[in-house]
Amino acid sequence: MSGDTPASPTAVRSDASIRTHLVMVRSTQDEAILLAEGKTDVPFWRLVGREKVFLIRCDGRDEVLKKLRAVHAGGTIPGLLAVIDADWDHIKGTQHGLPDLFTTDTRDLESLLVLCTRALEDVVWSYADPDARRAIEVSEGADLRALLLERARIFGRLRWVHLRRGCTFEFHDGLLNNHVDPKTWRVDEAGLLKALLGLGLAPDEATLRAELAALPQVQDAWLCRGHDLLILLARALSGPLKPAGQKKQPGQDDLLRALTLAAVPSGALHPTRLFVALRAWGVQNPSYNFL
């Protein structure tokens, strides 16, 4: 039967004990065993795999990689695989070189749902005022997906500066929420930069803007964090796209759930590189195929 085990601390475990634990799991489960990054990934993969996959929830991407390395240090375990968010891998050109490891086409799973599937259309159709949507798309000269990317881009580039500088302060969601106008749905870039300078992102605004300008041009799908896209979408649906008389609009968790339910059963994700790779894995491992 499909299920999942909760995240467990592995920092103090040796590679041998990690592998032994997963070998024991294999001995008790007939289906594929999938290492998932965390609690937001588990509902998605549970819906994808139905009764054909046993999920092990890890405490983040690093733990997934640690577990998979521990497995392969002692040889493969049949039917075990892992999926991680690409994070900065596409931009950095990182190659993990681990068998049975799969990464998202975009920066993460949430952005894959928003940017690579028609699920966004289905969800927006359910929650947005259609006239308000048409009005904002006409006034800004782009469709809603492009507008989401345009607004998320500055956050992605600032996160990139944060990474390159090795800053230790948290780039928290409030920085985004507090600098998006609830009525116009536009990002207050000057206010955002000022807030980040106050946290120590750079010594002054001129330096920060110069570093932003010097960043290489990369695909927005590799840069824009899915969680930021969900925050921006939630702000749009509770602001300029909110239907008249609607009292409550969906939050980020609601949107992720709705996107998952719209994308997975419909097969909307099947053309993505991630799903093509997972289907190929299933062909090579027919006893554990879950797609």
Image: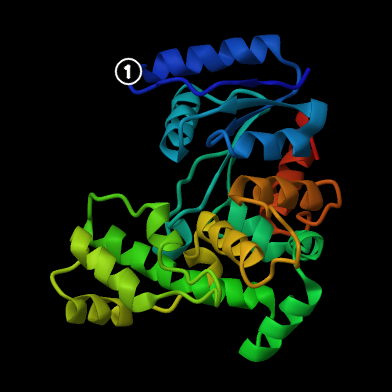
Task: Pinpoint residue 272: horizontal percent, then vertical percent.
Answer: 71, 59
Q: Quadrant of residue 115?
A: bottom right
Q: Quadrant of the N terminus?
A: top right
Query: Is residue 219 among the parts visible in the rendering?
Result: no
Residue at left offset 40%, top offset 75%: 188
Taking the spot 31% from the left edge, 50% from the top edge, the residue there is 170
Q: Which quadrant of the rendered structure holds the C terminus?
A: top right
Q: Viewer-proximal residue, 160 or 91? A: 160
Determine the residue positioned at 56% across, 39% down: 99
Residue 266, image x, y percentages: 86, 52
Q: Residue furthest left?
A: 203
Up-down relation of residue 209 to residue 288 (above or below): below
Image-based side of 256 in relation to 151, left or right: right
Furthest residue toward front: 245
Residue 65: x and y, percent? 45, 36
Against 21, residue 211 (above or below) is below
Figure quadrant of residue 80: top right
Total labels drawn: 1
Does residue 7 appear anywhere in the picture?
yes
Please tell me whether mark 1 sits on a helix, a strand or a loop: loop
Amino acid under label 1? Val
Residue 33 relative to residue 117: left or right: left
- In this picture the colour scheme is rainbow
**In the rendered image of this protein, does residue 149 appear above or below residue 284?**
below
Of the pair 188 and 99, the residue shown nearer to us: 188
Q: Residues within 10 Å of mark 1 (few under 14, many from 20)?
A: few
Whole-percent x and y of residue 56? Answer: 59, 25
Disc 1 designates what residue?
12
